[in-house]
Image (spheres, rainbow, N blue to C red):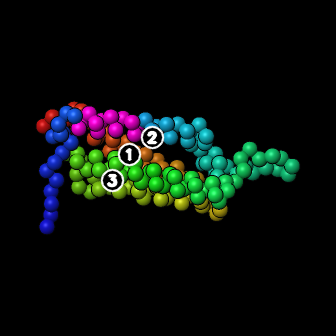
Amino acid sequence: MIMKNNFFLKDLEQSIKCFLIAFLITITAGICTGLGYIYYTTNIAADSISERYAGTVVEEHEIPENFPKSIQNMIQTTHEHVNSFAIISFMIGVIFYFNSIINGKLKTFLMIEPFISTIITFLSLWLIRFINTSFAYLVILSSTLMYLCWFVMIGVAMYELILKKD
């Protein structure tokens, strides 16, 4: 049995639209703050990401700028971020599901992809730390895709909540 969604964001009453808009603005501010922190700490450069997790390569008798992350720190970072990113992806995805603009496979891709990228991104951080620093490029690719999906879903939902009338 195929069920079709006949309920859309544009059809909501004004009070719930305002609530969802407030949430989407707030989550966007949080996401942008996180991106700002990433830029501030790594310049979104593969070498800086690698150094942040695997530590600074130094000559003998030099003090490294960054020490390799401890297992405890890696577990804590992974646990906190995977759980919070899953919740962010879920909340944005649920709101986005009720848009009337994007449907079909593209809608499904945009909703599912951030979960996949979350796993790939944080697995890649472990691979940087313990296998090879070149996995920083995978971190950049997967996290870029995740953020793009989030911003597309937020943008479409905001457009429909604020501007779409019919």
State whether residue 45 is above or below residue 165. below
Residue neighbourhood size for the residue with mark 1, other residues' Cα within 10 Å, grouped as few (<14), some (14–19), many (≥20): many
Asked whether 19 or 125 is in front, the reply is 19
Q: Are marks 2 and 1 in contact (CB under 8 Å)?
A: yes
Q: Looking at the magenta stretch, what is its main secondary structure?
A: helix
Q: Which residue is mark 3?
A: 111
Residue type highlighted by circle 2 = Ile
Examine the rendering and report whether any part of residue 139 can be seen: yes
Q: Which residue is mark 1?
A: 150
Residue neighbourhood size for the residue with mark 2, other residues' Cα within 10 Å, grouped as few (<14), some (14–19), many (≥20): some
State whether residue 142 is above or below residue 131. above
Query: In percent of the image, x 44 and y 51: which residue is there?
Result: 85
SS at mark 1 in the image: helix
- In magenta, the rendered stretch is 16-28
Tell me if residue 24 is in the magenta stretch: yes
In the figure, residue 157 lies in which quadrant? top left
SS at mark 2 in the image: helix
Q: Tell whether 85 sits left or right of 10.
A: right
Residue neighbourhood size for the residue with mark 3, other residues' Cα within 10 Å, grouped as few (<14), some (14–19), many (≥20): many
Q: Which residue is mark 2?
A: 31
| Residue 1 in the image, given as x and y percentages of width and height | 13, 67
